[in-house]
Image (cartoon, helix red, strand yellow):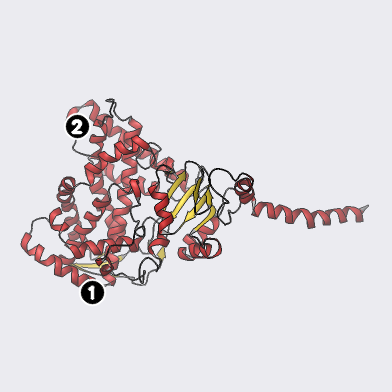
């Protein structure tokens, strides 16, 4: 009997354990992909090739391994494409959702231009706000987007903003030179957040703005996290930070409603006064969600872009010399006055430098959409409800799109980029509404840097980190002096 029982357990171990292991390893493919092999109707043929990972986590462990541990994100995407994505498209499971990865200009254009087939979606909409500009669709999106573009991205608005941001930029540069050694990303985030806090919600530097700054740091750390709402996770902490930030903005909004003298000429006031075609105002949650999402978008993209400008101009003195040739005559003409938006607009080489900084920085490594219905692309089926991830980083670093892509070369912008290869602000009808504002602020700080300061990297060979955004591990530590 003992021998029979032992034999039974051995047989079970030999047969069941490997089967359980296979089920675990291929569970997501069985659960998500297998049904589409038997229901090939509507949106085309078979699913793209790929592997969808283990239950719930999908391929996130491999993603985090390459992005966070070994810090080689390009190896992750290129290995997947070599294995599955000869056509620039493969299936996987990332950020809690079955996903289709697209990585060619034509595929990205197909996804980003087709609002009728795909909806915009952040991987964690609960953090940025489900009623915000980045989450809503259709008329609601068009209405708020039109207002935001008028407020922050049109020439008249940019002229006003250019003058508003410069006092903090110039005073910060002087302070940094007095310190002698600074961590650029840390310092730039302060001045960027002060300017955003002023223009978006009327906050002046002080305890409230400092608190908001800390809250948005925690909020942003959860944007690229696995959406697990349990104590101790980045996602849970980000939601807590969001709720606290929302409470501060709500208090400011209530102050303005109680006393008209508290009204200010800022984005919050404009959102509070907005009406639709039927004369209805935005709800409180719509106002607050949009403030939070716009701060997230403006804060991260602008501060990181400026940080990378410091980095690349320190690495490429030949580029710095050309910038000085363009800006020193402007500085002499201004004789201590602030540079204007119109002055910046005429700086052709500076514009090329800014575009190259944005391309190399790859601040947004991917763009998210969701299929509204089954969609066909090149004979492959993109199922309804699946997430589509446009792999922007790969587009910007593919030598088929940019010659010698890892070389910082502003002169490549003597000619426009090939269609669909430059997606730093997204593409299609949902391109970032503040793209010109971000470019303007980088250009302004470049002006003051090249005419008034010298700086060098303390750690020129610092390694890179890639989550939640790409940046040198030392956050660009520099020694800086005033000329």
* Quarter of the rendering containing residue 118: top left
Residue appearing at x 53%, y 52% in the figure: 380
Give the side of residue 378 with respect to residue 362, left or right: right
Name the one closer to the observer, 175 or 406: 406
* Quarter of the rendering containing residue 455: bottom left
Of callouts 2 and 1, which one flags the residue occurring earlier in the amino acid sequence? 2
Rounded to the nearest angstrom, the CA distance separating label 2 from label 1 is 50 Å
Element under disc 2: helix
Name the one closer to the observer, 58 or 111: 111
Give the side of residue 156 with respect to residue 95, left or right: left
Name the one closer to the observer, 336 or 22: 22
Q: Where is residue 477 in the image (x, y as percent from the top left)?
A: 31, 65
Q: Residue 380 carries which label?
A: none
Task: Read off the residue under disc 2.
Answer: 262
Give the side of residue 244 with respect to residue 182, left or right: right
Task: Read off the residue under disc 1.
Answer: 318
């Amino acid at each position: 009997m003992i021998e029979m029982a032992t034999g039974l357990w051995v047989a079970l171990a030999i047969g069941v354990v490997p089967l359980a292991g296979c089920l675990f390893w291929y569970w997501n493919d069985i659960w998500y992909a297998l049904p589409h092999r038997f229901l090939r109707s509507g949106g085309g043929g078979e699913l793209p090739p790929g592997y969808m990972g283990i239950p719930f986590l999908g391929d996130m462990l491999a993603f985090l391994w390459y992005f966070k541990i070994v810090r080689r994100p390009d190896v992750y995407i290129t290995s997947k494409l070599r294995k599955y994505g000869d056509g620039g498209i493969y299936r996987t499971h990332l950020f809690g959702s079955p996903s289709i990865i697209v990585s060619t200009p034509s595929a990205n254009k197909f996804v980003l231009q087709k609002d009728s087939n795909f909806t915009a979606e952040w991987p964690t909409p609960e953090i940025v706000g489900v009623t915000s500009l980045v989450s809503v669709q259709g008329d609601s999106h068009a209405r708020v987007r039109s207002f935001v573009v008028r407020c922050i991205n049109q020439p008249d608005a940019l002229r006003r903003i250019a003058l508003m941001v410069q006092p903090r930029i110039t005073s910060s540069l002087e302070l940094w030179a007095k310190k002698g050694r600074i961590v650029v990303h840390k310092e730039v985030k302060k001045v960027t957040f002060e300017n955003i806090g002023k223009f978006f919600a009327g906050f002046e530097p002080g305890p409230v703005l400092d608190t908001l700054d800390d809250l948005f740091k925690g909020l942003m750390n959860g944007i690229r996290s696995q959406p697990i709402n349990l104590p101790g996770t980045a996602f849970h902490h980000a939601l807590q930070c969001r709720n606290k930030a929302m409470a501060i903005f709500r208090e400011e909004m209530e102050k303005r409603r109680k006393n008209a003298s508290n009204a200010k000429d800022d984005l919050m006031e404009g959102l509070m006064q907005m009406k639709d075609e039927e004369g209805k105002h935005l709800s409180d949650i719509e106002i607050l969600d949009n403030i939070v999402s716009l701060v997230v978008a403006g804060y991260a993209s602008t501060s990181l872009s400026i940080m990378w400008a410091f980095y690349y101009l320190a690495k490429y003195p030949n580029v710095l010399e050309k910038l000085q040739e363009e800006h020193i005559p402007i500085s002499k003409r201004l004789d201590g006055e602030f540079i204007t938006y119109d002055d910046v607009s005429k700086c052709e080489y500076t514009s090329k430098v800014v575009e190259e900084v944005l391309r190399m920085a790859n601040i947004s490594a991917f763009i998210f959409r969701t299929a509204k219905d089954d969609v066909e692309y090149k004979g492959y089926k993109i199922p309804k409800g699946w997430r589509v991830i446009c792999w922007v980083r790969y587009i910007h670093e593919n030598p088929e799109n940019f010659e010698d892509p890892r070389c910082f070369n502003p002169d490549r912008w003597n000619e426009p980029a090939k269609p669909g290869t430059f997606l730093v602000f997204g593409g299609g009808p949902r391109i970032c509404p503040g793209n010109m504002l971000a470019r303007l602020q980088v250009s302004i700080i470049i002006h003051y840097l090249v005419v008034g300061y010298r700086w060098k990297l303390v750690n020129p060979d610092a390694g890179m980190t890639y989550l939640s955004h790409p940046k040198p591990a030392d956050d660009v530590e520099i020694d800086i002096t005033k000329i």
